[in-house]
Amino acid sequence: MAILTVPKVLREKLGDEGVEALIALLNEAAHHERDNLLGILAERFERRVTEEGKRLEVQMAELEKRLDHRITEEVSHLEKQMAELEKRLDHRITEEVARLEKQMAELEKRLDHRITEEVARLEKQMAELEKRLDHRITEEGKRLEVQIAELEKRLDHRITEEVSRLEKQMAEVSAQLQVTLSERYASLVRWMFIFWAGQIGVIAALLALLR
């Protein structure tokens, strides 16, 4: 901290140069004292930090030791509880499995008996249904045979009529085609004769010119 003012009496005794030298000396002493004080404080702080660090390390080691012991005890306790629980569960599972197996055996027995009764009942119903169906099929077969015979008779008559009609139409078409072909053939012959006659005339004219 710099010294800013000097008492008037002291300034008169020492003079301006003496006052300035005194101020510089005091400032230097104050600066030196501050450095020493800071060094002491830093040393004390470092020693305190070191001591607190060692103390905390000791406390943490003790705490870790206690926690390890507590964890070991808890793990042992939990393992013991788990072993007891596993033992009880095994016993309970064995009892439940035995009970379920017994129930399943009884249910299987009841189902076998029920299935046997249902199969016998269904077989009886199927035999009765088969008997009724055989009778119904026989009746329907006879009725269809009569209907088929009547239908066959009508179809034979219809086919005979249609064949006769088609034969008549084909005979008429055949006669018309023969007339048409005869007319077209005669016309074609006439045109061919005219064509060849013209060609012969042209050839004869060419030969006459070549002579």
Image (tube, rainbow, N blue to C red):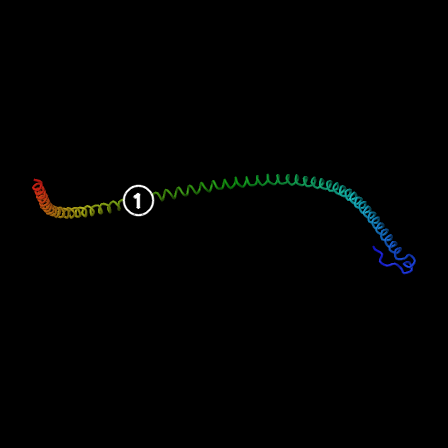
Q: Position of residue 200 (x, y in %)?
A: 8, 42
Rendering quarter of residue 149:
top left
CA neighbours of label 1 inside 10 A, class few (<14), some (14 to 19), many (20+): few
Number of numbered discs visible in the structure rendering: 1
Q: Position of residue 209 (x, y in %)?
A: 8, 42
Q: Position of residue 93 (x, y in %)?
A: 59, 40
Q: Quadrant of the N terminus?
A: bottom right
Q: In the depicted view, which residue is nearer to us: 182 or 77?
A: 182
Q: Position of residue 171 (x, y in %)?
A: 13, 46
Direction from residue 191 to residue 119 in the image, left or right: right
Amino acid of disc 1: Ile
Q: Quadrant of the C terminus?
A: top left
Q: Residue furthest bottom?
A: 8
Rendering quarter of residue 100:
top right
Q: In the depicted view, which residue is nearer to us: 180 or 17?
A: 17
Rendering quarter of residue 47:
top right
Direction from residue 79 to residue 107 in the image, left or right: left
Q: Which residue is mark 1?
A: 137
Residue at figure coordinates x 24%, y 45% from the top left: 148
Q: In the depicted view, which residue is nearer to us: 173 or 46?
A: 46
Q: In the depicted view, which residue is nearer to us: 157 or 188?
A: 188
Direction from residue 138 to residue 192 in the image, left or right: left
